[in-house]
Amino acid sequence: TSQLISFNSTDQAAIEALKLPNIIIKDVHSRIGVRNIGELLGNRFTILVRTDKPVDAKALETALGPIKSQGFWNFYSLQRFGNRLLTHRIGQMVLTGRHEDALRLFLCGSSPHETRTFQHLRTQAAEQWGNWAAMTKVYNEYPFFMEKELRATAALEQTGGNISAGLAAISDQIKFAVAAFGSYHFNALLSKKIASGDAPAELPLLNPETISLFASELGADQLAGISFSQPGLPFLGENRTKTAPTRSKIVVHSATVIPEGVIFHFDLPKAAYATTFMAELFDLYQGRPVPDWVNQAEVDTRAPLGYPPVTETTSQFMAGEVPGLAEE
């Protein structure tokens, strides 16, 4: 991935001299002001979809036609719900005041979508619930991957088990969980609108001002228990976007058929998901185990599109440090 970022009040030469594992810093320049959340215009993707049989280029172009002209339904994809696919449940617990349940699920909730090592780690942590020092010791086996969990247990240890302090220590994750809960119900609402044939151009996102619009989705009991304004969690009410388009626009630069599948090169606006676009064309499979039919040979997805070969980038990483090539 290549991203535009900013460092505030820092000497340019110091940035150019930075040496960070698995990161190449280039095109450094100075400007007044910093890049802020929300300033992203969109994302450009180059993705190889590996297929179980050769792709018919004509049929693919036919399927792409209406997507190019009309876009695709703007469902939030699986990434929105975290790698354990339970982030929306954490958000629901927070919004209904079940703070300890939410924190316990965040820290200890096991999921088959997580590696067995981390499932075992969370089971160990759950057995130590309330002994924050012991939980910290468990997570310290993998401090890089459990950085957020360690933030929370450190706050709990320092405050004698104050749950609000534990949640505040991971406020970025809790805000994401609350947003994921809203996204889950946005998807449900969009599905109903599509099925009924009256999907509008935009639908509301769940926040304090639009919550009543989700009454049919949430149900009276659940709706009555939701609160965005809660003591100790002042960040819950920070909602800027109130609606989202029901269709995502897309600019498809190319769809190149190769023996392994198709290389897609396209642009999406912010808050749109590449996997949602791909699901319009394929029955997607992701995760492990990798199906036997998948040709796992490395493919340079840049060279066929006329870009410099990917080896110009990978050669700058030390052997064994190329992102995506490390063993799980």
Image (cartoon, grey):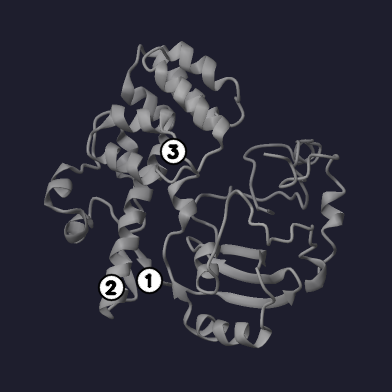
Position of residue 130 relative to residue 325, above or below, is: above
What residue sits right under mark 2 in the picture?
A: 193
What residue sits right under mark 1 in the picture?
A: 246
Left or right for 9, reference 125? right
Q: Which residue is drawn at 29% across and 75% down?
A: 195
Q: Residue at x 62, y 49 (%)?
A: 32
Q: Which amino acid does label 1 sit on?
A: Thr
Give me the C-alpha separation between circle 2 and circle 3: 30 Å
Query: Are dots 2 and 1 in contact, CB under 8 Å?
Result: yes
Q: What residue type is labelled 2?
A: Lys
Q: Which amino acid does label 3 sit on?
A: Gln
Q: Position of residue 219 (x, y in %)?
A: 16, 53
Q: Which of 241 and 146 is in front in this view?
A: 146
Q: Which residue is drawn at 60% across and 21% down?
A: 141
What residue sits right under mark 3 in the picture?
A: 173
Crowding near pointer 1: few (<14 within 10 Å), some, many (20+)? many
Give me the C-alpha separation between circle 2 and circle 1: 10 Å
Chain-order first, disc 1 or disc 3: 3
Q: What element carries label 3?
A: helix
